[in-house]
Image: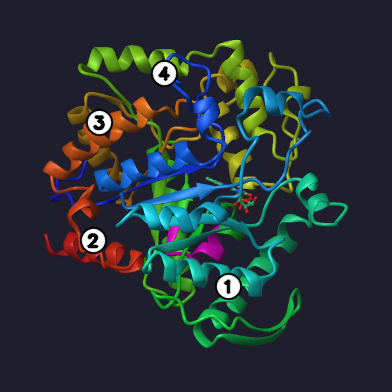
Amino acid sequence: MTSCATPAPFTVGWFTGWGVPDWSGPWAGDAADTWVDGTFTVETVRELDRAGVDLVVMEDLNYLSDVVGGTFEQELRTTARAPKHDPVVLMSRLAAETERIGLIATASTTFWPPVELARTYATLDHLAGGRVGWNVVTSTGDRAAQNFGLDALPGHAARYATAAEYLEVVHALWRDGSVAHRGEHLEVTGRTGTRTPAAGRPLVCQAGASPAGTALAGRFADVVVSYPPGIEAMREFRTQVRAAAEAAGRDPDDVQVLYLVTPHLGETDELAAQAAARYYDPTDAAVRRRLVQMSGDIDFSAFDLDAPLPDDVSTEGSRSILENLRRVAAGRTLREFIGSQRSEAVRLVGTAASVADQMEDVLAQVGGDGFLLFGGGGGVLTRRYVRELCDGLLPELRRRGLAGLSATGDPGATLRDRLRTRRREGVLR
Ligand SMILES: Cc1cc2nc3c(=O)[nH]c(=O)nc-3n(C[C@H](O)[C@H](O)[C@H](O)COP(=O)(O)O)c2cc1C
């Protein structure tokens, strides 16, 4: 079912991190050397800024995992999640090197002291003229906890209960510069000594999509990172987030649900289909990489590859990621689905014009807010990939008045203002 309403402008962001891009494929260039000092990421974000991408979300993992096989070997061999630097540290440089793009860095409510987080992000927001956001995560994995002096990661419910109090505390610190909070999970008394952030407060982005994660997003998030698999799941998830916002007394239009996608472009639809076929080919290397990416606190390599995912697998890490896997697996064996499964909501394949059509069509069906372009899921992130999207897809979307509009927007606008204006323009069209 496709809606015939006039298409409204939507948000296009980019999801990446300060990790290892594709460093060994034919278009890797010097990425193996230039990711370490930030050059690759800085150059990428400058390209995105030039192309009018609205925001970049810098994911992070604050530990090295040995969940897969009890060693670090697979983790480091596949470079799917490690090594990785702290994106918060890169933010001030990104602020200086870009003009309009929103800069969102991940930090965990389970491990950062709230006063330090409020101060750091307020400071960054001044440096970037109101373009900064915080991607709120609660972390996954006991190894993360051990990096911070705990034996094990607090359970899922406990982490989210802490996160809710944490967000209240941080908002109070941004608003008043001080807080005296004595709650069930947190006790914080502090003064940041930092001026109120440039944009009043940084944008809040949220990435967990379990029921607890959705409730948290409804209360606090401006932007939600997600990849519910397929149109139906996308629509369902967005409805849940909007309902959670309404239940928290907010205008649901103040929360944007963005879907991860990895578009495959070509000069013709046929060439694009060939590139996509290579990307989704379930080779042994692809299976190994996905096993590592999926293994938060579960060792997926311990399961029989030729059997379906066992029913009794559960996680204290990300429940929505496990749930997405189950939906995609649909009873198939691990080997059958895992090699071609990616962290993306829908597949977008074709010429720039075809992919723009597909994006319009998907959003018409889910009623959605926009996309997060993601070149990291299968290790496809190269300078070439960034250029294809920035010089192929974004100009096509801009010609249609749909996205990439930050390229010509007011450079003085704050990130939250820009997203809100886009929404108003959409309503007025
Ligand atoms: C799309 C997506 C992206 C995520 N990115 C990160 C991340 O960069 N760093 C991190 O520590 N956790 C990340 N997470 C984990 C969650 O943010 C969350 O804090 C937690 O692990 C529980 O997730 P759940 O609500 O899906 O169960 C991500 C989760 C999702 C669904």
**Label 4, label 3: how far apart the Cα atoms are:** 22 Å
Query: Mark number for residue 135?
Result: none
Give the mark nearer the N terminus: 3 vs 1: 1
Query: Mark 3 sits on what residue?
Result: 355
Amino acid type of the residue tagged 3 in the rendering: Val
* Residue extent of the magenta highlight: 214-223
Give the mark nearer the N terminus: 1 vs 4: 4
Position of residue 214 measured from the top left corner of the image (x, y, whole percent): 54, 59
* Element on which disc 2 rests: helix
Position of the N terminus, as image quadrant, is top left
Query: Mark 1 sits on what residue?
Result: 118
Residue at image location 85% in from the left, 57% down from the top: 149
Q: Quick check: can you spot residue 154?
A: yes
Position of residue 163 measured from the top left corner of the image (x, y, whole percent): 65, 66
**Residue at the extreme right:** 151
Label 4 neighbourhood size at 10 Å, few (<14), some (14-19), many (20+)?
some
Whether pointer 3 and pointer 1 mark residues with C-beta atoms closer than 8 Å, the reply is no
Query: Mark 2 sits on what residue?
Result: 422
Residue at image location 48% in from the left, 72% down from the top: 247
**Label 3, label 1: how far apart the Cα atoms are:** 39 Å
Q: Is residue 307 magenta?
A: no
Give the mark nearer the N terminus: 2 vs 4: 4
